[in-house]
Amino acid sequence: MRGQAGSAQPLVSLLTDFGLVDPFVAEMKAVIVSICPQAMVVDVTHGVDEFDIRMGAFLLAEAAPSFPAGTVHLAVVDPGVGSSRRPIVVKTKRSTYVGPDNGLLIPSASMEGILAVFEISKPSMIGREVASTFHGRDIFAPVAAHIACGHRPDECGPPIHDYVPSPFQDPVVDDKGVTCEVLHVDRFGNLATNLTHVHLKDLHTEIGREITLSTGRRRIRAKVVRTFSDLKVSQVGLILGSHGFLEVVCRESSAAKRLRIRRGTVLHVSGS
């Protein structure tokens, strides 16, 4: 059977907070290829902090645009496993997402345009006894494999409309600037915010101008630049990152350490 996009080799991406010490990731992959032997499974990351839905949602939203249309994205960061939390499939204009109904899938799926969301309830799409502590292996992996090999998302169960929304708040724009949040700190110490290039207009600024970052009582000046090389060494800047989010950076240094800012910090950005 051919993949949902008509390709000869269906593609499943995999993101979890399982780490690589235990065999959990391997067990999920084994289930996928047992059901859909021709599937290629590509790891996004298994280094999401334990139970951190927001971190997983951000990393999935960063990675998904690089995958081809028709990819099945399987993501499991699931502190509510075994509870009344529903397993879902999200069909978008470009891809299909499989995972828990806790907001993990929604930021990425929303960027692609959500067409429908289905609760996974059909035993035929699972086909095995379900352990209450490992839905990644026993529910999500079989469903992702079946969809990758041609089954439709609506075969998984009934449509739902009350799914858990994105765990992120939208930036707040006022006459003094924009209030945003640091969504992620990468290994270089760059601070990815929930601002995009459109918010530069809200700040009434442009490339080469300076802005003010405020957190609590602290105020930091930063230069809006295109590349790291437009900054002096150790100078703080605001740059449009490779995934479309505005990032606070510090050339050849960690902005997170330099500014003592971490993931979840609320920033107010003004153009003056």
Image (cartoon, rainbow, N blue to C red):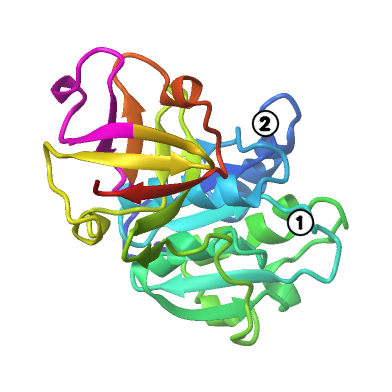
**Residue type pointed to by label 1:** His
Instruction: Report the residue marked by disc 2.
Output: 19
Note whether 91 is above or below 72 in the view shown.
below
Instruction: Report the residue marked by disc 1.
Output: 135
Left or right, 206 with reference to 173:
left
Magenta stretch? 221-245
Q: Residue 222: horizontal and vertical position, in percent?
A: 28, 33
Q: Nearer the viewer, residue 13 or 220?
A: 220
Q: Nearer the viewer, residue 27 or 162?
A: 162
Name the residue: 57% across, 47% down. 56
Q: Nearer the viewer, residue 34 or 137?
A: 137
In the rendered image, which quarter is residue 100 located in?
A: bottom right
Q: Quadrant of the N terminus?
A: bottom left
Q: Residue 230: horizontal and vertical position, in percent?
A: 14, 24
What secondary structure is found at the residue carrying circle 2? loop
Note whether 133 is above or below 174 in the view shown.
above
Note whether 116 is above or below 125 in the view shown.
below
- For disc 1, the neighbor class at 10 Å (few under 14, some 14 to 19, many from 20) is many
Q: Residue 22: horizontal and vertical position, in percent?
A: 76, 29
Note whether 253 is above or below 61 in the view shown.
above
Disc 1/disc 2 C-alpha distance (Å): 16 Å
- Contact? badges 1 and 2 (CB < 8 Å): no
Name the residue: 33% across, 55% down. 8
**Residue type pointed to by label 2:** Gly
In the rendered image, which quarter is residue 93 located in?
A: bottom left
In the rendered image, which quarter is residue 225 located in?
A: top left
Q: Residue 156: horizontal and vertical position, in percent?
A: 62, 77
Q: Earlier in the sequence, mark 1 or mark 2?
A: 2
Left or right, 16 with reference to 8:
right
- For disc 2, the neighbor class at 10 Å (few under 14, some 14 to 19, many from 20) is some
